[in-house]
Amino acid sequence: MPTDLLTGPWALAVMGLLVLGDSFFVIVPGEIAVTALGAISSASGSPPLWAVIVCAAAAAAAGDAACYLIGRTVGTERWRWMRGRKVRQALEWARRRLDGGTATVLFTARFVPFARLAINLVAGASGIHPVRYLCLVGLAALGWAAYQASVGAIVAALVPGGPVVAVIVSVVVAVGLGAVIDLATRRARR
């Protein structure tokens, strides 16, 4: 049965790897994995929702910290891809945002895939104190993981049809919420 794989011992590890990979490559479905496992948790009771949240938060914080470390040790200009016009614009945008409020930006960036990478690289290159950075990123990752897993869990509790239906509907709801937030953000910037 397909849900046996999602409730088994490897489900949290696979989700964690997807979330970690999502920190570097935005095409990796880390958010979807957390939402889906939150739905599975609610529908089947396994893995426990708290474990989904803790594992997702740990993987997200580890990925963000790795990006910070790359920014701190390598900087933001060493490799050719970092000097491209669009990447330079993203990094300058991130630098301006970090100057305006580090905590707000780190929390917000956790929910925006492309911004997350730029913000964490620039945070490292800017020399933000590692202890302060790690505390803020840990809290942001925990909030993000709780949100993502809760969307799946709430949808699974409200929608009848078992774990497979819960996963499908929760992923659609999560993607829809993300699209609405993106639209609202774009309109607010105008």
Image (cartoon, helix red, strand yellow):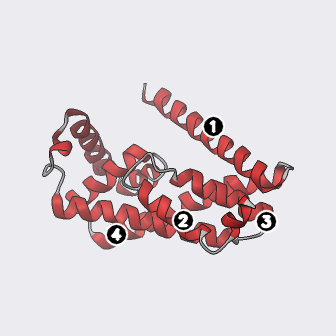
Quarter the N terminus occupies: bottom right
Residue that mark 4 sits on? 132
Question: Which numbered disc, 3 or 2, marks the residue that appears first in the sequence?
Answer: 2
Disc assigned to residue 176: 1
Residue that mark 2 sits on? 14
Disc 1/disc 4 C-alpha distance (Å): 33 Å
Residue 11 in the image, given as x and y percentages of width and height: 61, 67
> Is there CB contact under 8 Å for labels 1 and 4?
no
Q: Amino acid at mark 4?
A: Arg
Question: Which numbered disc, 1 or 4, marks the residue that appears first in the sequence?
Answer: 4
Label 1, residues with CA under 10 Å away: few <14, some 14-19, many ≥20? few
Residue 138 in the image, given as x and y percentages of width and height: 45, 68
Label 4, residues with CA under 10 Å away: few <14, some 14-19, many ≥20? few
Q: Is residue 34 left or right of residue 160?
A: left
Question: Which numbered disc, 3 or 4, marks the residue that appears first in the sequence?
Answer: 3
Disc 2/disc 4 C-alpha distance (Å): 29 Å
* Tag in front: 3 or 2: 2
The residue positioned 26% from the left and 47% from the top of the image is 95
**Mark 2: secondary structure:** helix
Q: Quadrant of residue 21?
A: bottom left
